[in-house]
Amino acid sequence: MTPRWPSLSRRGRTAAGEPGGGDDSSAARPRPAASGPPPVVQLRRVVKSYGLGDAEVHALCGPIDPETGRVPGVDLTVQTGDFVAIMGSSGSGKSTLMNIVGCLDAPTSGRYLLDGIDVGYLDEHQLSLVRNRKIGFVFQSFNLVPRMNAIDQVQLPLAYAGVKPEQRQRRALAALSMVGMLDRADHRPNELSGGQQQRIAVARALVMAPAMLLADEPTGNLDSRSTDELLAIVDRLNASGRTVVLITHEDEVARHAKRVVRLVDGRIVSDVRQTALQGPPPALIDAAGFAEHTLHVPRDDS
Ligand code: ADP
Ligand code: MG
């Protein structure tokens, strides 16, 4: 089927002739990879605007043409196995980007392929299935369910996916083990430190074996030691093949990524590869260059 451009018009508000919309040139079409899996994320000319007329704000826009005012949109591709930090000051468009990449919000115009799926064609129910299976979310505020113990929290995505109870328990315990929290399986959030709560949230994000871990300021509410512990877990997950997209405004956090993308006013102003896509992330290559205690994170499987 030939995509009807713009593919997101059903849920967005793009019309031909509008800035950033109505263009079907070949440059906008994601190219299939020559071989191997499709990129986990392919954003093409993605624009997100709020408000109308004089009140219009472009939260994502790319480099606006100063003469025509044309909004080209943002292109971003994330390959399987990469570890990308998205950086930018407050208001630069990080959360807007996260919401689009996480299929929590639709772009105003442009196209998004998640793990090869054009999400612009999906209805809300299909989108919720894609989110459940493809993306593991981690938020700054942990977003755990109060009064629910850790193993039940981690089983939630499996329950939504219809996984049988006996399998749920086994997979949840495996995920808790990956984050060194097996011994806290029956603890509730109010019985855990912030760092421990975030590790439970990471276990919950991982339990479906998603295509991507998507984290918005995951260390924003953590002290420095818990931050190092959490990042060591993320480093290890990436080293074992998990794709990670992490939003942060902290250089110390971005140092852990293989690639750093910087946003200013809704456009990508730099995109720097710190270490090779194939291979371990920076902290596992240059352990001595990172905080000493990151090397001693508890893990239950060692
Ligand atoms: P960041 O996460 O980098 O701080 P955001 O993506 O939250 O930035 O916001 C980018 C821009 O879009 C800001 O100017 C913000 O005020 C604006 N914005 C974000 N969400 C909305 C909204 N729901 N309505 C209007 N403007 C918004
Ligand atoms: Mg934000």
Image (cartoon, helix red, strand yellow):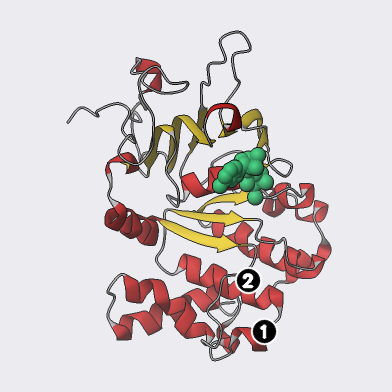
> Height in image: 66 above or below 112?
above
Give coordinates of residue 246: x percent, y percent: 61, 51
Q: Position of residue 216 (x, y in %)?
A: 61, 55
Tell me: 105 left or right of 200: left
Q: Residue at x 62, y 30 (%)?
A: 268
Does the numbered disc 1 mark a residue whose Cβ is under 8 Å from ligand 2?
no
Residue drawn at point x = 35 percent, y = 38 percent: 36
Q: Quadrant of the N terminus?
A: top left
Reading the image, the residue beneath label 2 is 198
Q: Amino acid at mark 2?
A: Gln
Q: Which three-letter amino acid code belongs to the residue tagged 1?
A: Leu
Q: Which residue is mark 1?
A: 192
Query: Where is residue 299, by image quadrant?
Result: bottom right
| Depth check, front residue: 45 or 65 | 65
- Viewer-closest of 113 and 51: 51
Q: Residue furthest bottom?
A: 186
Indicate whether 223 appears above or below 69: below
Tell me which numbered mark, 1 or 2, is placed earlier along the sequence.
1
Cα–Cα gap, marks 1 and 2: 9 Å
Dot 1 falls on a residue whose secondary structure is: loop
Q: Would residue 279 be visible to someone looking at this image?
A: no
At horizontal 57% and vertical 15% (from top left) the residue drawn is: 69
Contact, CB < 8 Å: mark 1 with mark 2?
Answer: no
Q: Give the number of callouts.
A: 2
Looking at the image, the residue that sits furthest to the left is: 1
Q: Quadrant of residue 115?
A: top left
Q: Badge 1, how many Cα within 10 Å: few under 14, some, many 20+?
A: some
User: Is residue 150 visible in the rendered structure shown here?
Assistant: yes
Name the disc covering residue 43, or none.
Answer: none
Report the side of 116 relative to 20 (left or right): left
On the image, the x and y values in percent for residue 143 come to 57, 70
Q: Residue furthest top?
A: 67
